[in-house]
Image (cartoon, helix red, strand yellow):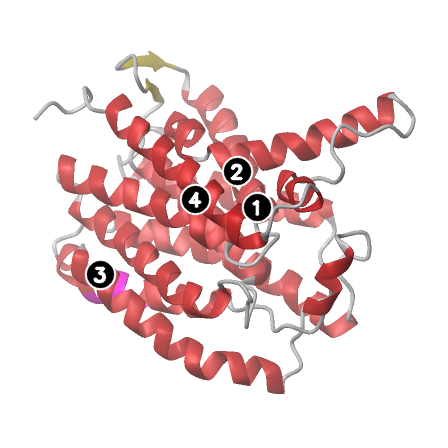
């Protein structure tokens, strides 16, 4: 797992060295939201689709170091990677359309939702068929299981996956934020894998962590490249898939607390705006934009949000400690 992290970091850093100037030559620049913070307009034209570098890094490490597991018939780590890759492909199509039309608009919300829902259902059915997923819903902290009919669980799980993927996507709004918040989440799953003997899944989570650390070389403020929807949807797919591959989707609540806060701030803002005919709860949604307008720097925001995630991931580890004692 450690080697997967190191290999992914090195591959991502090397790929990034060539990818960033290549994206510049292609003029694959990000179009900044017109209604976003005014100082973000200085980022106009920064290359996007940089998520390709950590997708490549994680892929190389997952396949290379998980090869023996695949030879022995264990493919769970590959399923998780391929599922995340499908979401990355959806994001790539979205990014490509944005770059081609030079607007901050890609696929429609309906198109994204249907594609993501289809991918989620396919993944869940595959994991169920392979015996890697059960409709017993594990409740962290209470160490109990709630048995659900498979169809009910499938509907619940599909919407959890789509919601989680889009929550991660929404978190990707300032330099280094989505990557920095997801590093401790990947570390959480790696520690859980080492603890429970889920080595093949730990290879993927370790590779994801290394890839994100390599990506931050180029994405930390001031960002030389953005991950784009290519990267953020891949990340969302990876986080959601790991939660289900470990058969504990509710763990997304503590480890994904920042994703949830960002999403809820957006939902509350839109809902309150419609109910009050123009009034707002936040200066701007999602939450990171509100805090920016309150005077927080991007570096402070990333540090605080990542720190909160570290604490919540530590609590989550305590919350699952009774699942496999010893």
Could you tell which of marks 4 and 1 lies nearer the N-terminus?
A: 1
Provide the secondary structure element on which disc 3 rests: helix
**Residue positioned 73% across, 74% down in the render:** 100
Tell me which secondary structure the magenta stretch mostly adopts.
helix
Residue indicated by mark 4: 306
> Residue 320: x and y, percent?
25, 24
Give the magenta range. 60-64
Residue indicated by mark 1: 171
Q: CA distance from mark 2 to mark 1?
A: 6 Å
Based on the displayed image, in which of its 4 quarters is residue 5 positioned? bottom left
Provide the secondary structure element on which disc 4 rests: helix
**Residue positioned 81% across, 30% down in the render:** 280
Vertical comparison of 11 with 65: above or below: below
Q: CA distance from mark 4 to mark 3?
A: 22 Å
Left or right, 276 with respect to 94, comes to right
Could you tell which of marks 3 and 1 lies nearer the N-terminus?
A: 3
Classify the position of the N terminus by image quarter: bottom left
Residue indicated by mark 2: 259
The reply to whether the C-beta atoms of the residues labelled 2 and 1 are less than 8 Å apart is yes
Vertical comparison of 23 with 162: above or below: below
Q: CA distance from mark 2 to mark 4?
A: 11 Å
Classify the position of the C terminus by image quarter: top left
Could you tell which of marks 2 and 1 lies nearer the N-terminus?
A: 1
């Amino acid at each position: 797992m450690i080697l997967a992290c190191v290999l992914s970091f090195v591959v991502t850093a090397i790929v990034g060295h060539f990818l960033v100037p290549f994206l510049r030559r292609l003029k694959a620049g990000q179009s900044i939201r017109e209604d976003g913070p005014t100082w973000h307009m200085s980022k106009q034209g920064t290359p996007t689709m940089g998520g390709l570098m950590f997708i490549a890094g994680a892929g190389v490490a997952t396949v290379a170091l998980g090869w023996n597991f695949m030879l022995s018939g264990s493919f769970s780590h590959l399923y998780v990677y391929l599922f995340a890759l499908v979401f990355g492909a959806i994001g790539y199509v979205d990014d490509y359309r944005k770059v081609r039309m030079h607007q901050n608009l890609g696929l429609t919300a309906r198109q994204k939702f249907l594609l993501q829902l289809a991918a989620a259902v396919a993944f869940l059915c595959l994991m169920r068929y392979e015996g890697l997923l059960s409709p017993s819903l594990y409740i962290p902290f209470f160490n109990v299981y709630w048995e659900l009919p498979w169809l009910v669980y499938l509907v619940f799980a599909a919407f959890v996956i789509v919601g989680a993927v889009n929550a991660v996507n929404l978190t990707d709004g300032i330099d280094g934020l989505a990557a920095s918040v997801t590093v401790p989440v990947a570390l959480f799953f790696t520690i859980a894998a080492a603890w429970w003997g889920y080595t093949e899944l730990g290879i993927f989570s370790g590779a994801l962590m290394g890839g994100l650390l390599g990506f931050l070389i180029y994405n930390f403020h001031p960002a030389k490249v953005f991950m784009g929807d290519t990267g953020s949807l891949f990340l969302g797919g990876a986080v959601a898939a790991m939660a289900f591959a470990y058969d504990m989707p509710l763990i997304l609540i503590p480890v994904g607390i920042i994703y949830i806060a960002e999403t809820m701030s957006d939902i509350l803002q839109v809902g309150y705006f419609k109910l009050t005919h123009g009034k707002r709860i936040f200066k701007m949604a999602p939450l990171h934009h509100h805090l920016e307008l309150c005077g927080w720097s991007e570096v402070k925001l990333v540090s605080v949000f990542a720190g909160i995630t570290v604490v919540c991931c530590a609590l989550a580890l305590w919350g699952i400690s009774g699942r496999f004692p010893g």
